[in-house]
Amino acid sequence: MKYTNILQKGAVRILVFHETDAWYAVALEFNIVDAGDTPQEAMLLLFEAIRGYLESAKKIKARPAILNQSADPEYEKKWHENIETKKQSSSVFFAGTMNVMNGRTLIPA
């Protein structure tokens, strides 16, 4: 099976949205979710979690499957709605893709 993401390079879809009393940031392919009081805090916490996840995967020489997980259907739907319509819902702060280089650096795609 050919994987999109490998330890050396890849991309992860990011979704940041507001629900109830918190902001949530999601890395869809990694199934990582973080929360914060502001969208910026949620994104920062997510980026830190992604870095730790990638560093751990690299350290244990993990197989690519953990970098290419199926996203939760709720997040998948919300991400697609915001990307395909090119119109963000009022509860969404960010929906996009970040490139992952050398298993640690996140840059906008």
Image (tube, rainbow, N blue to C red):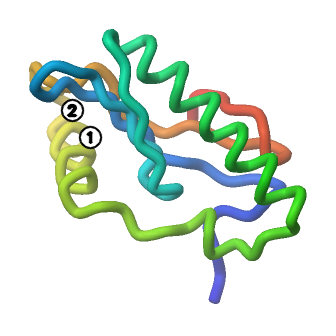
Q: Quadrant of residue 61?
A: bottom right
Residue located 85% across and 57% down the image: 58
Q: Nearer the viewer, residue 3 or 16?
A: 16
Residue located 28% across and 22% down the image: 23
Mark 2, residue position: 86
Q: Quadrant of residue 78?
A: top left
* Residue 3 x %, y %: 64, 74
Q: What is the count of numbered marks?
A: 2
Q: Residue furthest bottom?
A: 1
Marks 2 and 1 sit apart, C-alpha to C-alpha, by 5 Å
Residue 37 to residue 59: above or below: above
Mark 1, residue position: 83
Give the position of the N terminus as an image quadrant.
Answer: bottom right
Residue 55 to residue 86: above or below: below
* Residue 57 x %, y %: 77, 59
Residue located 85% across and 45% down the image: 102
Q: Nearer the viewer, residue 105 or 87?
A: 105
Give the position of the C terminus as an image quadrant.
Answer: top right
Residue located 15% across and 39% down the image: 85
Q: Amino acid at mark 2?
A: Lys
- Would you call the spot at circle 2 few (<14 residues within 10 Å), some (14-19), or many (20 or more)? few
Q: Nearer the viewer, residue 85 or 32?
A: 32
Secondary structure state at the residue bearing disc 2: loop
Secondary structure state at the residue bearing disc 1: helix
Q: Identify the mark at residue 97; answer none if there is no mark.
A: none
From the viewer's perspective, tell me whether residue 109 is left or right of residue 13. Answer: right
Cβ–Cβ below 8 Å for labels 2 and 1? yes
Residue 73 to residue 75: above or below: below
